[in-house]
Image (cartoon, rainbow, N blue to C red):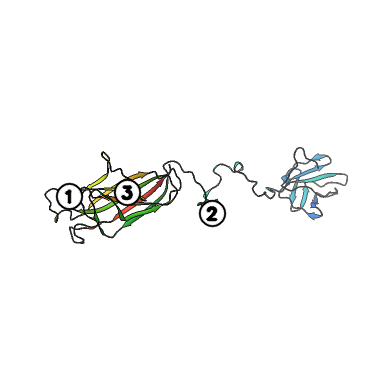
């Protein structure tokens, strides 16, 4: 049977075996000599005496049998029976044939995704301001380091590594630090900042500003002051323009007088009441640029 337009390429369109009318309403359907089982009468195109019959009204199907609504006679003519494709039948889809345009918007749900996805080789574009990753570490011990006047010193125990995923990312570096600086002058101020690898992320020039914490108080002598560590919480936004691993480290400047910089401890390294220790931490957050 010819088709108007492009011939079907899938679905199983078949002209079934010829049927000879007789004094019965039931006729066995075959395809290439084998029984054919339609899913529904609506699937069949049946011509009887030159007239297309209405499925469900003029005929039904029962298994592999075509059943007319009344018995025929030998003078009737069953012209043809065509199966118009298997119900919901589709051919095998060629690899790569399903394109993006053929997938409905919002059609892919999380249930269709694998439980484990490796996206390490994929470039993901996130909205500006999205958090891409967070790295965190803390130092619970104590350490004591000699400092020099007006010299920036990397704090060895406060450091963390991060590998940015994009060159336009912003890196938010945050540090909570508990410290004590032993020097001979009252009203002493210790400044804090950060190193990115070997680059100091502050501008120690006239008029520049640092995060600073007071370490002394007037009329307190050296032996009495700061039985509890001073604490500082500082945040710095960096733009490293790199996708290589970066090490961020806390930095300290002892100000005008040299002395001992104590991390997480007081003038006396003791857990006695009034000489409490602290925990210091550093957090780096990558933010989409």
At 13% from the left and 48% from the top, the residue drawn is 218
Pointer 3: what residue?
Answer: 194
Residues packed near mark 3 inside 10 Å, few (<14), some (14 to 19) or many (20 plus): many
Q: Which of 27 and 248 is in front in this view?
A: 248
Q: Quadrant of the N terminus?
A: top right
Q: Would you say the residues marked 2 and 1 are in contact, meaning their CB atoms lie under 8 Å apart?
A: no
- Residue 204, by quadrant, is top left
Question: Quick one: label 2 or label 1, which is nearer the N terminus?
Answer: 2
How many discs mark residues in the rendered view? 3
Pointer 2: what residue?
Answer: 114
Residues packed near mark 2 inside 10 Å, few (<14), some (14 to 19) or many (20 plus): few
Tell me if residue 69 can be seen: no
Label 3 SS: strand
Give the CA separation, mark 1 to mark 3: 23 Å
Question: Quick one: label 2 or label 3, which is nearer the N terminus?
Answer: 2
Give the CA separation, mark 2 to mark 1: 59 Å
- Single out the residue that lies furthest toward the left: 219
Label 2 SS: loop
Please provide percent x and percent y for residue 247.
38, 52
Give the CA separation, mark 2 to mark 3: 41 Å
Please provide percent x and percent y for residue 39.
71, 50
Please provide percent x and percent y for residue 65.
77, 52
Q: Nearer the viewer, residue 264 or 100?
A: 264
Please provide percent x and percent y for residue 266.
21, 57
Label 2 or label 3, whichever lies nearer to me, is: 3
Pointer 1: what residue?
Answer: 216
Q: In which quarter of the image is the C terminus?
A: top left
């Amino acid at each position: 049977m010819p088709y108007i337009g492009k011939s079907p390429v899938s679905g199983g369109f078949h002209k079934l075996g010829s049927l000879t009318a007789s004094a019965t309403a039931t006729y066995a359907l075959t395809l290439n000599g084998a029984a054919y089982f339609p899913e529904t009468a609506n699937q069949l195109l049946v011509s009887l005496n030159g007239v297309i019959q209405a499925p469900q009204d003029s005929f039904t199907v029962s298994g592999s049998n075509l059943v007319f609504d009344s018995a025929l006679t030998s003078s009737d003519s069953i012209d043809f029976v065509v199966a118009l494709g298997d119900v919901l039948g589709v051919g095998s889809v060629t690899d790569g044939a399903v394109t993006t345009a053929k997938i409905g918007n919002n059609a892919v749900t999380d249930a269709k995704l694998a439980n484990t996805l490796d996206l390490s080789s994929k470039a993901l574009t996130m909205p500006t301001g999205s958090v891409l990753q967070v790295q965190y570490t803390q130092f619970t011990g104590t350490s004591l380091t000699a400092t020099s006047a007006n010299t920036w010193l990397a704090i060895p125990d406060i450091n963390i590594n991060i590998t940015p995923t994009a060159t336009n990312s912003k890196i938010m570096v945050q540090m909570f630090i508990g410290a004590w600086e032993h020097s001979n002058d009252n009203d002493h101020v210790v400044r804090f900042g950060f190193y990115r690898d070997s680059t100091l992320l502050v501008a120690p020039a006239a008029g520049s500003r640092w995060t600073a914490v007071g370490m002394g108080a007037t009329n307190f002598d050296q032996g009495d002051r700061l039985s509890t560590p001073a604490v500082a919480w500082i945040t710095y936004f960096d733009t490293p323009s790199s996708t290589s691993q970066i090490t961020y480290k806390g930095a300290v400047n002892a100000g005008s007088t040299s002395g001992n910089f104590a991390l997480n401890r007081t003038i006396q390294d003791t857990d006695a009441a009034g000489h409490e220790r602290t925990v210091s931490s550093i957090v780096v957050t990558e933010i989409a640029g």
